[in-house]
Image (cartoon, grey):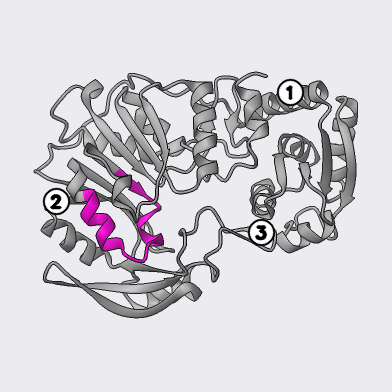
Amino acid sequence: MTAIDAIYELGISHNKFSLPLPDGTFYPDYFFSSDKRPLEFLKSFDRIRDGDWSDCTFSDLGCSEGSTTFGISQMGSTVYGVEGRADGVERAKVLQQIIGFERTHFSVGNVDHEESYRQVDAIFNAGVLYHLEDPVTCLERCAENARLFIYLDTGHAPGSQQEREGSKFASNFGRVHTVKRHGLELEAVDFAEPSTTAEKKGGVRRGPRAGIGNTNSVWLSHASTVELMKVLGFPYHETVGEQPHIPRLRTCFWRTEPKAPSPLGTLLKPLPAEAPPEAAIAAARTRDLAYLKRTGAPVIVIGHEPLLAAVAEDLRKGGANIDAVIKAPGNLGDKLPLRGLDKMLDGRSGRVAVATRDVARASFNLMKLDRFGYVFTSFALARERELA
């Protein structure tokens, strides 16, 4: 078994961003551009860097399957990825075998626990803070452990009723209140996480982008976050990006005044080059067919016509072992919802090839059902372009 073959044995990816692989594919193979925030982090850290890149140390909190961690590693620094869910760390370690980065390290750890932090030069804190019941303690620990710089990408309490009502998460927001710490009255709003704390219940796993063990999280306002970080020893800040429909901001915090921004320069240990989407889809399809033919692993095909017939035909011609072909109700542009998939698959498990336009959503829902080993999306992506 090759290193890349190992990704077929680790369950379904829950990465939100892709990682380019040396064979010209992406992981997961239905996203076609990698996360740009790591380069934003490196460029912003460079404004305060006081040593060689090889001597720098970083932490990536809530690293998921490591795509951002590897992005941060592209200057050859020592990087520690910490993730609360063990299956994410398992995938990150397999991906490391494929792309290298021997100075990148992964461990299972909950950011609510002090032992998940270590002394580093800078901390990448993205998509984590707004899933916590106690975001202040997390920021305190970041400030205690980051020598120079903290990059924070998080949702913030809406600044107005209009912003609250216009948010994509409007129904999740709860009471508005203040958190009293460090002599400050920090503006905050409650946010509803999944209603059960169990990681798995009734055959469905908790969403891997939700908090761990809590049904409520607390979102600080941006102004309060800036005020708190100043008290914690990071008085210099710049907001470098925003998503007002959440609302969510990317903010850099420096312990001392940073230099003016300048180009980052050549990456000293770059990730594999990103292939164009068409080429990446073709490479993934070739690899997937070779794996299915070589292993004889049975695969279930599920989706909408006419894509369903096209994907099934590709698999048969390629020598794959088709276990079942399941036609979903509705039209090609319709979603494959979680409960609908569960009902149609009727207790089946194993590997699935989806035949739908929204392969990312279908893959995410099959991952949440927690009984499927892998989802093949390359066949649908290839044939959908032909049918379009």
Q: Is residue 318 left or right of residue 70?
A: right
- At label 1, which amino acid type do we have? Thr
Label 3, on which residue? 204
In percent of the image, x 35 and y 57: which residue is there?
A: 129
Dividing the picture into quadrants, the one containing residue 335 is bottom right
Closer to us: 373 or 234? 373
Label 2, on which residue? 234
Where 347 sits versus 194, above or below? above
Q: Which residues are magenta?
A: 124-142
Label 1 CA crowd tier, 10 Å (few <14, some 14–19, many 20+): some
Label 2 CA crowd tier, 10 Å (few <14, some 14–19, many 20+): many
Residue 152, given in percent of the width and then of the height, sits at 30, 50
Residue 121, given in percent of the width and then of the height, sits at 20, 36
Whether tag 1 and tag 2 are in contact, CB under 8 A, the answer is: no
Report whether residue 205 is seen. yes
Label 1, on which residue? 286
- At label 2, which amino acid type do we have? Phe
Residue 200, given in percent of the width and then of the height, sits at 61, 58
- At label 3, which amino acid type do we have? Val
Residue 89: say if magenta.
no
Q: Is residue 292 left or right of residue 182?
A: right
Per the model, the C-alpha gap separating discs 1 and 2 is 50 Å
Q: Is residue 325 left or right of residue 71?
A: right
* SS for dot 2: loop
Q: Earlier in the sequence, mark 3 or mark 2?
A: 3
